[in-house]
Image (cartoon, helix red, strand yellow):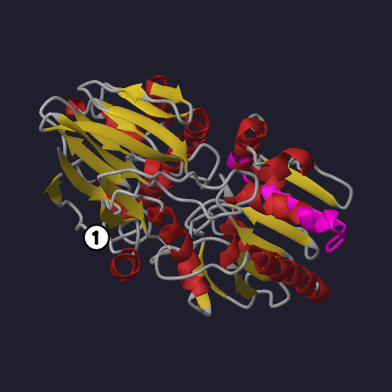
Amino acid sequence: MKIRFLGAARKVTGSCFHLLTDSTQVLVDCGMNQGRNSDTLNREPFRFHPEQIDTLLLTHAHLDHSGLIPRLAAGGFPGKILSTSATAELSEIILLDSAHIQEKDAEWHTKKAQRAGKDQVFEPLYTTEDVRACLPQFDKNGYDSLHQLPGGMRFRFVDAGHIMGSASLELWFHDGGRDKKIVFSGDIGKNGNPIIRDPQHISEAHYVVVESTYGNRFHKDLDASIEELEKAVKETFRRGGNVLLPSFAVGRTQDVLYILDKLVREGRLKDLDVYVDSPLADKATKIYMSHPEFFDAETLNTFTFRSSAGMKIHFTTTIEESQKINRIKSGAIIIAGSGMCEGGRIRHHFKHNIWRQECSIIFTGFQVPGTLGRYIVDGAKRAYILGEEMAIRAKVYTIGGFSAHADQGELLEWLGTFTTNPRVFIVHGEEPVALEFEKTVREKLGLTTYVPHLGEELEI
């Protein structure tokens, strides 16, 4: 079998792996690029013929893993999109939201060109119609069940513990009259993630394709991170400001709500007004609530995603509701997308708060180079937001312990459970991080490792 590394190779985003045998072609993920030059990269022709792909196996719903599926289907992909049930449901709302944003952006750029006397028309990467057209191709599968693929391969999803429905993938294929097995980690969650269960370990494989997003660092202890969040909120409110929390609508928002609820239940924070200003987060939270079978035991016993004594949760869906939040000058926790500040409603809230030194911005997730979020985290003093240059006077907090990704120690723990000395391909990391993690894996675990280049094809 041949494997082609068509995304997330020596970078974090754009997950896409192309598997070829004499009898079948399979994709694992078909994700968007994010960060610098992402629009150009996402519009490049696929490095394969979509109509020749038999099956797409999707590890989870985040855009950097799922975001180009509508383009794939519109390009002629005829097969099934195999995922867990929660991934299928979350992918639907994420992709529809992505298409809506692209349609609005294309419309805005076209009008801007027309006002400048140009005839240029901008096209969205894909449309809501493209998304709706591909939804019937999704096929829902459970964890731990073995399934047959066209062409003789077999696969199984196991819980990756990253977001609801996220999966690592076990894939068996024939080679020289015997079965071989390749495992794709997907995005591995850290142990103790709120709401969902810890990652499931796998013991046997000939080859492993593993992520390395945090392969060169260790997260803060979760309890210490919760204490840091508590302190940031209290200090901000004492200064008379608002807390701005850029957050991914799927996964991180639900985790933050859980943690704030925990702080209220323990009496460490009280009388919170939390505004979740994201129609997508509202829909995602409802999907989370509908799948308690994915919850861990503590969440089943304590959490409901609803307002409670000491914390009012306001989900806003309309533009008018969003605009009303900007009249609030202090005492609000405003959770809005996008998580890397590249779009969404967080920029509008920045416009009303980022220049106010009494306010705070709290980042709880990885910021890809080239994004506004990374620019702010790296210490920028000014930024252009919605076409206006603004001073960045709000206090900036980066709390790494809330990441949904495993850190270096947890990645080594996950790899260390393999008893068959697999060959390891390291992906999903910025190039220096992936190379450092490769060295660590060789030294700590004694495994044969390789960091593939983008577009590289290998025989396995």
Q: Residue at x 52, y 77 (%)?
A: 382
At label 1, the amino acid type is Thr
**Residue 316 at x, y = what percent?**
70, 43
- Left or right side of 318 for 384: left
Of 250 and 96, the residue lying toward us: 250
Of 142 and 255, the residue lying toward us: 142
In which quadrant is the C terminus drawn?
Answer: top left
Query: Which segment is the magenta one?
Result: 262-280
Q: Which residue is drawn at 45% across and 25% down?
A: 141
Q: Check disc 1: other Cα within 10 Å, few if <14, some if 14-19, many if 20+.
A: many
Q: In which quarter of the image is residue 243?
A: bottom right
- Left or right side of 243 for 100: left
Q: In which quarter of the image is residue 23?
A: top left
Quickly name the residue at label 1.
449
**Residue 313 at x, y = what percent?**
77, 47
Q: Can residue 108 be seen in this view?
A: yes
